[in-house]
Image: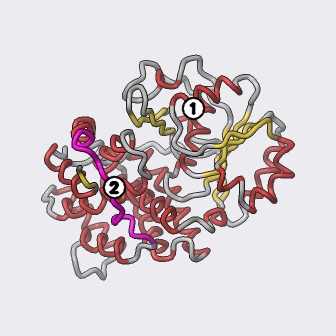
Amino acid sequence: MSSSLMIANRQTWFGAGSISHLIPLLAAEPEPTLLFSCRSFLGGGVYAELAPALSPWLVGTEVVGHEASPEDVDRWVARWRGNVRRVVAIGGGSVLDAAKAFAALAEHPLPTLRYMEKVGDSRLSGSMLPLIAIPTTAGTGSEATQNAVITDTRIAKVKASLRHPNMVPQVAMLDPQLLAGAPDRVSAFCAIDAFTHLFESYLSKTASSLSREMSLTGMRLFLHAWPELNRSDGAREAIMQASYLGGLTLSMAGLGVIHGIAGEIGALRAYHHGQVCGRLLLPFLALLAESGQPRQRTLMAELSERLFPQAQSGPERYLMDVITRHAVAPFWQDDLPLSHEELAIGLNKSNSKNAWLDYSPAQRRTLIEAAFRIE
């Protein structure tokens, strides 16, 4: 039987209005604090109300507009090293990952690339600035994970993680009200990313009974929220829980071939990561429906029995139908091109991660060609 290790936040607040705990937490232990955020949050009503009480505790603010590059992290470290003793991140996954990367690298001597998986030659020591993570989207689960995703499009041309157990934020505040007002497309992209985390960690060959139970709970929450994303308080609460559980389970059990491909595509094109995962998920479900791998078949039967015993079709076809029929935005219909050269790079660098099967280049090619227009 497999075992798994869960490393979680020291404190996790959940529920509407959870962000109200931020100011008392900062005031209880005064430290020079750097805020990482995004323009959409900084320009919104929640920040307008929060800013007068928050500003006295801040030494500065960094605005994150895209997935952080190694150069971004190095620039932040050069600007703030020695002047900051705590970090607050309020935003989507890119904001949280940027803040996590800074909180780690501010305590390390070498440039970011030296510590990145796939290309680095040095290990993180675990030294970190304290970090408070407050997600405003529900998808990456970065508030609960041990890694920060960094995208290098200039030197190594790689999308990879900085990783250490101490990179799990000390404090997470999960406030479903912060999801309100997001465009349907963004809500759908993020939610399908959360589902893919849960689904791949459930199918992972390194999952334990605990992590699989958490994955099943998260997928049940996703199925409840998916048709009503950003339309009801209940759906926002459910998808935020699902995203958090996805962050925990991906750290415990790892992911599969979908993320094994998506990470490489993300280093080539600036497509939304959740949309890429969702586009790959649909053909993967079709491929999975044809699989005779015994453990995959058993797991899918158990998933169907637990989550939708009323289904008349196989579990893979049922999921494909629910995801496409009830989506608040048709994420699979946008024209997303890849060049033949990018296809070749994606095939060469991608892998099956923790899947029960080692998916062949031909199978991975099928997934990529079904998800993207090759030009």
User: Residue at the location (34% across, 76% down)?
Assistant: 308
Image position of 284 (left or right of 178): left
Query: SS for tag 2?
Result: loop
Q: Tell me, yes or no, whether the highlighted magenta stretch contains residue 335.
A: yes
Q: Is residue 3 visible?
A: no
Q: Of tags 2 and 1, which is closer to the observer?
A: 2
As displayed, is residue 245 above or below residue 84?
below
The front one of 166 and 185 is 185
225 up-or-down from 203: above or below = below
Marked residue nearer the N-terminal end (2 or 1): 1
Badge 1 element:
helix
Query: Which amino acid type is marked by label 2?
Result: Leu
Q: Residue at x 68, y 36 (%)?
A: 130
Report the residue marked by disc 1: 72
Q: Position of residue 26 (x, y in %)?
A: 80, 44
- Predominant secondary structure in magenta? loop
User: In this image, 199 relative to 185: left or right?
Assistant: left
Q: Residues within 10 Å of mark 2 (few under 14, many from 20)?
A: some
User: Which quadrant of the view contains residue 287?
Assistant: bottom left
Three-letter code for the amino acid on which mark 1 is drawn: Asp
Q: CA distance from mark 2 to mark 1?
A: 26 Å
Give the residue at x 15% y 44%.
360
Q: Which residue is mark 2?
A: 336
Q: Give the residues in magenta.
A: 329-343
Q: Is residue 21 magenta?
A: no
The quarter of the picture where residue 47 lies is bottom right
The colour scheme of the drawn protein is secondary structure
Residue at 58%, 26% in the rendered image: 74
Q: Position of residue 7 (x, y in %)?
A: 52, 42
| Image spot of residue 301 (x, y percent) | 25, 68
